[in-house]
Image (tube, rainbow, N blue to C red):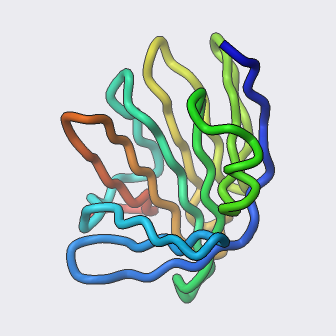
Amino acid sequence: MSQRSNVAPSTIGVDFVEGGVVVEYLDGRDVFYHGPPKPVERTVKTPPGKEVHVLVTDPDGVEGVMTYVNDRNTQAEILESTGVGRVMLEGDDEEVLFPGVTVSTTAYAIQVEAEPSAVDGRVFVFAEDEMSEHAYELVEAVD
């Protein structure tokens, strides 16, 4: 298996539509994440074994940055052409993805923490595999 490295994300388009979130990659492709995202207070621990994608948008929700966490399948050149970033964590690593957004590993799960007041926008976490999709929005407080 080839070594995977961190890749810095670029700004990509975002569109909130009925039933989910559309991410517009730099290469012209769109990806639909089913939703609506479930509001979760500040921290979400994803189910083990899921592909985890973190999206941080601007305040208007029209653009943002997307980072894949521990993606071992996508080549760096493909990520760069789409504008998606990647962060690789090992053991009990922790990494700041964006000011106010931290990702860490806990056993086989990924934990994403956000300080919503420090993020000038919105924070979404998508966790999926062949069997299920989960969508979360990290918020200050759930009403």
x then y, percent, for residue 26: 66, 72
Q: Can residue 111 be seen by looking at this rendering?
A: yes
Q: Is residue 141 above or below residue 77?
A: below
Residue nearer the viewer, 47 or 71? 71
Rendering quarter of residue 100: bottom right
Rendering quarter of residue 68: top right
Q: Can residue 143 be seen by looking at this rendering?
A: no
x then y, percent, for residue 66: 60, 58
x then y, percent, for residue 115: 59, 56
Q: Is residue 62 above or below residue 25?
A: below
Q: Is residue 65 above or below residue 4?
A: below
Q: Please state the total of marks drawn on the protein image.
A: 0
Q: Is residue 127 left or right of residue 64?
A: left
Q: Identify the residue shown where x is 47% and y is 51%.
A: 42
Residue nearer the viewer, 15 or 27? 27
Q: Identify the residue shown where x is 68% and y is 50%.
A: 78
Q: Identify the residue shown where x is 19% and y is 34%.
A: 131
Residue nearer the viewer, 100 or 36? 36
Q: Identify the residue shown where x is 45% and y is 15%.
A: 108
Q: Quadrant of the C terminus?
A: bottom left
x then y, percent, for residue 104: 60, 29
Q: Quadrant of the N terminus?
A: top right
Q: Is residue 46 left or right of residue 82?
A: left
